[in-house]
Image: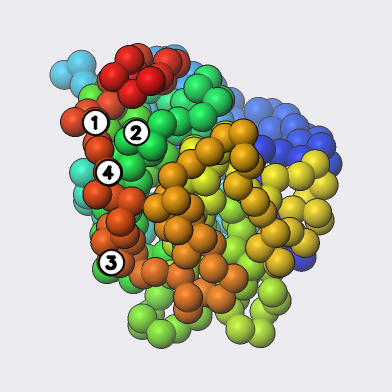
């Protein structure tokens, strides 16, 4: 079984492979020149390095008017084969078609001799993964607020028959106003009809739904995103994903049996548990649809009216 890009909460084996891949990527992907000129003559000034994933490196870019963007940069040398090219084109096509307040905005796409650049709205405050690392656990009102924004973005995707297939804390970024923005459409797929199925095994180990691991016979659909929302909610409230283990195969065995528990020393409310249990239903048909999630009792609890930058490192005083 091939699983692409195990980047988050890496088990030992995956971490080694990932490092190798990253070294290869760094060798291929030269830092873009300090000024990138597009074919139709627009100039962008390159700024700081923002981060890298399994496929791309990200830099700040400034246009002539001083507006700052993030440029996802993919080395042309790394997209030599047709399959990789098709995947990148699919990511661009899908991302370009989306516009929602909680989805990273796609601005433009261009190339020079060395790289392909995907210009995106800048999210300078990192992702939910870094927030969780710094905070260890996140309070229920904050998670509720995050969940509403995540569900909003995924509702938009599913209504357009797009499955994200790589929902995870590391792909949900904070914009300058600390609103959440869903990004990375590298594994996204548009279903030709609501009842068609996907058969490629993909995702990030801790977030993969049991039906994806179950084999190629039955396929999977929108419910894999609902499962991943359950994983994120659990991880934010408890501090680590529910099926976490050193060995990837152990993670998969636990997922296939939905073998997880709620630790007693990190208590969470009964209504939060109910929602997580439903999101993490083994049978995809027993999970709520994206339109049903916000009707759960748990969402009747208190909300902060906004996320402040201080929340990236500390529990807001009002929620202690
Ligand atoms: P990949 O497809 O290779 O996984 P990602 O889309 O995850 O690439 O981006 C790689 C890294 O670049 C992210 O982990 C993050 O650090 C940074 N990044 C991506 N998009 C943005 C953005 N819009 N604003 C700021 N940084 C970003």
Of labels 2 and 3, the one closer to you = 2
Foreground residue among 235 and 131 = 235
Cα gap from disc 4 to disc 1, whole angstroms: 10 Å
SS for callout 1: loop
* Residue 31 appears in the figure: yes
Within the image, what quadrant is residue 63 found in?
top left
Marked residue nearer the N-terminal end (4 or 3): 3
The alpha-carbon separation of the residues under discs 4 and 3 comes to 19 Å
Residue 43 in view in this figure:
no
Q: CA distance from mark 1 to mark 3?
A: 22 Å
Which residue carries the number 4 mark? 301
**Dot 2, how many residues are within 10 Å of its Cα: few (below 14), some (14-19), or many (20+)?**
many
Mark whose residue sits in front, 4 or 2: 4
Choose the circle earlier in sequence order: 4 or 2.
2
Of labels 4 and 1, the one closer to you: 4
Q: Give the SS element for disc 3.
A: loop
Q: Nearer the viewer, residue 214 or 283?
A: 283
Label 1 belongs to which residue? Answer: 304
Ranked by sequence position, the earlier of labels 2 and 3 is 2
What residue did someone put label 2 on? 142
- Residue 293, percent across and down? 33, 61
Image location (x, y in percent) of residue 134: 52, 20
Q: Earlier in the sequence, mark 1 or mark 3?
A: 3
On the image, numbered disc 3 is attached to which residue?
291
**Which label sits in the foreground, 1 or 3?**
1
């Amino acid at each position: 079984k091939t699983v692409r890009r195990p980047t988050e909460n890496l088990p030992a084996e995956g971490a080694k492979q990932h490092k190798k891949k990253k070294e290869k990527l760094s060798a291929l992907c030269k830092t873009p020149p300090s000024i990138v000129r597009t074919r139709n003559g627009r100039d962008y000034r390159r700024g700081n390095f923002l981060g890298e994933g399994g496929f791309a490196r990200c830099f700040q870019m400034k246009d002539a008017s001083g507006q700052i963007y993030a440029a996802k940069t993919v080395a042309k040398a790394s997209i030599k084969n047709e399959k990789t090219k098709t995947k990148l084109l699919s990511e661009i096509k899908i991302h370009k078609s989306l516009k929602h307040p909680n989805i990273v905005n796609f601005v433009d796409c261009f190339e020079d001799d060395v790289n392909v650049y995907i210009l995106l709205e800048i999210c300078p405050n990192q992702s939910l993964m870094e927030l969780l690392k710094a905070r260890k656990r996140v309070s229920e009102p904050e998670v509720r607020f995050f969940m509403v924004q995540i569900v909003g973005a995924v509702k938009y995707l599913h209504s357009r028959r797009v499955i994200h297939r790589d929902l995870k804390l590391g792909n949900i970024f904070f914009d300058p106003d600390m609103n959440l923005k869903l990004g990375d459409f590298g594994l996204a797929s548009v279903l030709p009809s609501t009842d068609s199925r996907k058969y490629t095994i993909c995702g990030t180990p801790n977030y993969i739904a049991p039906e994806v691991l179950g084999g190629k016979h039955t396929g999977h659909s929108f419910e894999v995103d609902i499962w991943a929302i359950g994983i994120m909610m659990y991880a934010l409230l408890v501090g680590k994903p529910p099926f976490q283990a050193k060995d990837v195969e152990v993670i998969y065995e636990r997922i296939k049996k939905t073998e997880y528990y709620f630790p007693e020393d990190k208590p969470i409310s009964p209504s939060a548990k109910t929602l997580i249990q439903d999101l993490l239903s083994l049978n995809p048909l027993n999970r709520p649809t994206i339109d049903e999630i916000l009707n759960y009792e748990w969402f009747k609890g208190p909300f902060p009216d906004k996320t402040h930058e201080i929340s990236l490192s500390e529990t807001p005083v009002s929620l202690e």
